[in-house]
Amino acid sequence: MYLKRPAGGLAFCLFYLASCFTNKYVLSVLKFTYPTLFQGWQTLVGGLLLHVSWKLGWVEISLCSRSDILSWLPASALFVGIIYAGSRALSRLPIPVFLTVHNAAEVITCGFQKFVQKETSLLKVCSSLFLLVAAVCLPLCDTQFDPNGYLWAFIHLICLGAYKVFHKLWKPSSLSDLDQQYINYVFSVVLLASASHPAGDLFTALDFPFLYFYRFHGSCCASGLLGFFLMLHTAKLKNSTTSGQYAAWSFLAKVITASLSPLFFVMTANILTISCLVIGGVGEVLLVYTERTGT
């Protein structure tokens, strides 16, 4: 059975949906497009909540080796690229389009396994080809084509793929997933806070029209909390299920989110755009199957 541990999996899907929709609302509806501030806020909230949870004994974090922490910093730099470029892309692209390009990061992982480690299967190569075709053809078929949106989406894809490859290459096992995320949060807060003034976000945001509106404050608080709980449930689901089961839950969360998003956010699509989304979905199904069977 692909979907085991339904309570944890359904909670993961719920937080994935709510987090994605909240971020989209802030970025596209309210148009708060200041990523150093928005992502800095989210990582600050996540880092503080993870620190409090650690001190209260709710989660276990062990940061005893300075060498391991320093060796993880390149991944933290890639993490900043992932969330910064992802924020830029999501503000401009519909959620189904963004997720389709996001999923193509698996092509980089597959390419690394195929040409460097020489260990990937033919079925995984086929799934990656489906994901690649969907991501490459989408800009050519998209009736809402936004060049900047796709540019940031592909930067997000590259950073995410490189992050996954680094994670596969990284040898020390003393850092857990929560340890790694804690380092990511701290590094992101420092870097994004430092970049907010040079990027022009710090003072430009003072002219944001909804700066003093409760719906903006509420949405930002919700985005920080939901992002933290999504991270926590992701780590919990990964540790309590096999890679195939986690891949199945992740696929289900993306399908639910992409399917419901046109009901809440504007999206126009033609048959070619929908075909690209379906091709990307087929690639994801094949990927779930390969993770499930170990082929």
Image (cartoon, helix red, strand yellow):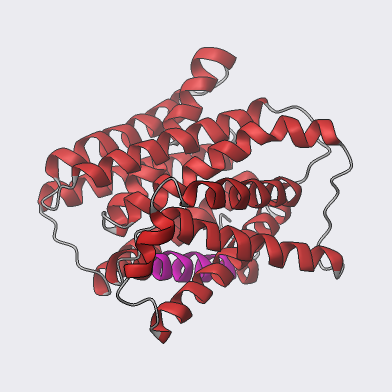
Quarter the N terminus occupies: bottom right
On the rendered structure, is 239 left or right of 11?
Answer: right
Which residue is rendered at x = 28% and y = 51% of the image?
Answer: 97
Q: Is residue 12 magenta?
A: yes
Residue 277 locus on image (x, y percent): 26, 49
Which residue is rendered at x = 70% and y = 67% of the image?
Answer: 49
Residue 160 locus on image (x, y percent): 49, 38
Quarter the C terminus occupies: top right
Instruction: Please name whichever residue, 243 or 62, is drawn nearer the observer in this view of the structure.
Output: 62
Res. 283 visible in picture = yes
**Region of the chain picked out in magenta, as a range:** 10-23
Q: Quadrant of residue 259?
A: bottom left
Residue 12 locus on image (x, y percent): 57, 65
Which residue is rendered at x = 17% and y = 49% of the image?
Answer: 273
On the rendered structure, is 160 left or right of 189?
Answer: left
Q: Is residue 142 magenta?
A: no
